[in-house]
């Protein structure tokens, strides 16, 4: 079995250990980031939806930075939302704070019924820089 090249952010390990998954894996020039939610360091959800979305992006960005890249390197994004008909506009009002400018990554938005107490989750596949900072 090949050793996984796992990327951990400087903080926020409670959910990774509790649910037994890696935050991100480097493979073949790409970074595959597990879904990030708006959790505090102890794993509890941020109660306000817009603050939860901001925290999910901040958690995502911490992983991207730990791997030597940024959201600008994201090529594929998947977002999961509880009750998207009711929450989409609230969530999408926050996204431009983090999204950057065109050209944008691809995106798939999925409505779900359960996210372990969270209302929003974002996962990405990002291209790793050819010469990452050491």
Image (cartoon, grey):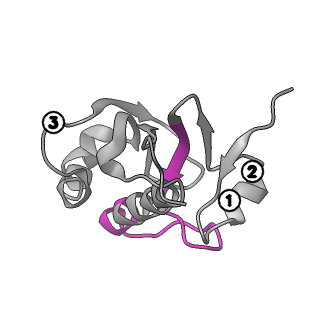
| Quadrant hosting residue 12 | bottom right
In three-dimensional space, the C-alpha distance between marks 2 and 1, rounded to whole angstroms, equals 6 Å
Q: Residue at the location (50% across, 34% down)?
A: 30
Q: Residue at the location (45% across, 47% down)?
A: 131
How far from the left and from the top, in percent, is residue 61?
Answer: 42, 59
> Split into 4 quadrants, where in the image is the C terminus?
bottom right
115 in magenta: no
Taking the image as shown, residue 22 lies to the left or right of residue 17, namely left
Circle 2/circle 1 CB separation < 8 Å: yes
The answer to whether 65 is drawn above or below residue 115 in the figure is below
How far from the left and from the top, in percent, is residue 79?
Answer: 39, 39
In three-dimensional space, the C-alpha distance between marks 3 and 2, rounded to whole angstroms, equals 34 Å
On residue 122, the disc is none
Circle 1/circle 3 CB separation < 8 Å: no
Q: Which residue is mark 1?
A: 15
How far from the left and from the top, in percent, is residue 53?
Answer: 36, 59
On residue 103, the disc is 3
The secondary element bearing badge 2 is classed as helix
In front: 47, or 122? 122
The answer to whether 59 is drawn above or below residue 126 in the figure is below
First reached walking from the N terminus: tag 1 or tag 3 = 1
- Name the front one of labels 1 and 3: 3
Taking the image as shown, residue 79 lies to the left or right of residue 107, namely right
Q: Residue at the location (15% across, 36% down)?
A: 103
Give the magenta range.
Answer: 31-53
In three-dimensional space, the C-alpha distance between marks 1 and 3, rounded to whole angstroms, equals 32 Å
In front: 28, or 86? 28
The secondary element bearing badge 3 is classed as loop
Q: Residues within 10 Å of mark 3 (few under 14, many from 20)?
A: few
| Quadrant hosting residue 47 | bottom left
On residue 19, the disc is 2
């Amino acid at each position: 079995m090949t050793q996984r090249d796992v990327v951990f952010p400087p903080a926020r390990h409670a959910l990774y250990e509790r649910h037994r998954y890696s935050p991100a894996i480097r493979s073949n020039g790409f970074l595959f980031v597990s879904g990030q939610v708006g959790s505090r360091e102890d794993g509890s959800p941020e109660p306000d939806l817009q603050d939860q979305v901001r925290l999910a992006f901040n958690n995502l960005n911490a992983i991207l930075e730990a791997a030597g890249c940024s959201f600008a390197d994201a090529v594929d994004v998947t977002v999961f939302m509880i009750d998207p008909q009711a929450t989409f506009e609230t969530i999408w009002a926050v996204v431009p704070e983090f999204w950057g400018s065109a050209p944008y990554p691809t995106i798939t938005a999925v409505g779900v019924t359960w996210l372990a107490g969270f209302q929003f989750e974002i996962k990405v596949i990002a291209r790793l820089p050819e010469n990452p900072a050491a």
